[in-house]
Image (cartoon, grey):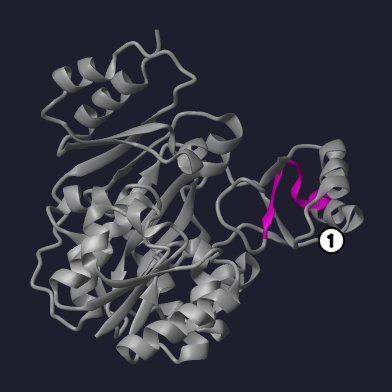
Amino acid sequence: MNYICFSPNFPPNYFRFAVSLRKLGVNVLGIGDAPYDTLHPELRWAFTEYYKVDDLHRFNQLEQAMDHLIRNHGIIDGIDSHNEYWLETEARLRTKYQIEGLKNRDMAKIRKKSEMKKIFQKVGLNVAIGNIFRSFSAAKKFIDKTGYPIIAKPDTGVGAADTFKIKDDNELREFFSNKPDLDYIHEEFIHGDIFSFDGMVDKSGNPVFYTALKNQKGVMDVVHENAHTYYFTLLEIPDDLLEAGLRTLKSFELKGRFFHFEFFREHNTSRLVALEVNIRPPGGFTTEMFNYSMDVDVYHEWAAMVSGQKSETDFTRKYHVCFVSRKWKYHYRYSHEELMEKFARLIVFHQHVEDVLSRAMGNYCYLIRSKNLDEVFEVQSAIHQLN
């Protein structure tokens, strides 16, 4: 079996996907723009061959890489980066080279928020009221019914950098005066907490495992305010979140992939409102959170699923695991060394965060593990406590 790991050096912990494939006997190939010598040593070990291109955005270079690897190794059985940014590029490659997985025809429903909304509504899920508006007057008619604030976000986009919270007519005029040349979807503002339903499905679309997360603050607010963030795994998934997650999973007909579905729980009504689907693992170090929360190895489980091996793993959720970030602009009460001495039993992982992710994920992160959520929050509070 030949499997291509695309842009395999980012995020840095994802080298474990390639390593897990290699350990199961898969012929692992790589296409990326990073010099070979800069790759993680275990990633270099995993690759039979790595093809460096100058620019992953130049499709002709990717075609040259694919043609070369096919000549040298034969038919390609799979390709993935596990990164939302490359979904469309990977789909183009799968379509051209007839590789199993998401193709060009699948992109609209998993990339366009307007198309996601239609599918959510079709299966009876609540959604934020909204639509694509291309002029001030059209958006204003919508706002006259819903009121301010509203959220304007790219219909197709990654992250929250180009998302806006618009609070009055002046900000709406400014938005349309300076709007990027993209379709924007405008939605009512939902006052609520963000939950996610996460996991992986096998090649037949059956869940291998699923779990859930709760976010202390939305990514948009974290990015715009340059604020702290933390989020944590749940031991018990609320019945309505489980039902909505499984219904979403079935409606999008996913096969052989990780998934990350986001929902608001509205403060006033407690109802769930479907936000968006992401056909990849949750970002940052959330895959490590899965591992620590269930005492598993999701990198191995993905590789086993890809290579056709049946899993016998117990995916029982055993612990709350909380991601907690620090940002260097703050002065903290406890040093890193003091935290590690004080909470050594509970801090199971800590690491520098890549600069490109720091606005949303912080400059440094800790993973806290405990069966007691109050104990988790005690450590989170100490990490974030300022002088």
User: Which amino acid type is marked by label 1?
Assistant: Arg
Q: Does residue 254 appear in this view?
A: yes
- x and y percentages locating residue 172 in the rendered image: 83, 44
Answer with the quarter of the image where residue 137 lies: bottom right
Query: Is 151 contained in the magenta span?
Result: yes
| Relative height, residue 105 to residue 238 (above, below) | below
Secondary element at image label 1 = loop
Left or right side of 241 for 122: right
Quarter holding the N terminus? bottom left
Quarter holding the C terminus? top left
| Relative height, residue 119 to residue 143 (above, below) | below
- x and y percentages locating residue 98 in the rendered image: 45, 92
Left or right side of 65 for 297: left
Q: Which residues are magenta?
A: 143-154
Q: Does residue 76 appear in this view?
A: no
Which residue is pictured at 29% across the width and 19% down the height?
382
Which residue is pictured at 16% across the width and 44% down the height?
319
Which residue was labeled with disc 1?
A: 134
| Relative height, residue 368 to residue 155 (above, below) | above
- x and y percentages locating residue 160 in the rendered image: 59, 47
Near-viewer residue (369 or 302): 302
Answer with the quarter of the image where residue 251 lies: bottom left
Near-viewer residue (384 or 143): 384
Which residue is pictured at 40% across the width and 52% down the height?
283
Query: Is 356 contained in the magenta span?
Result: no
The single residue placed furthest to the top in the displayed view is 387
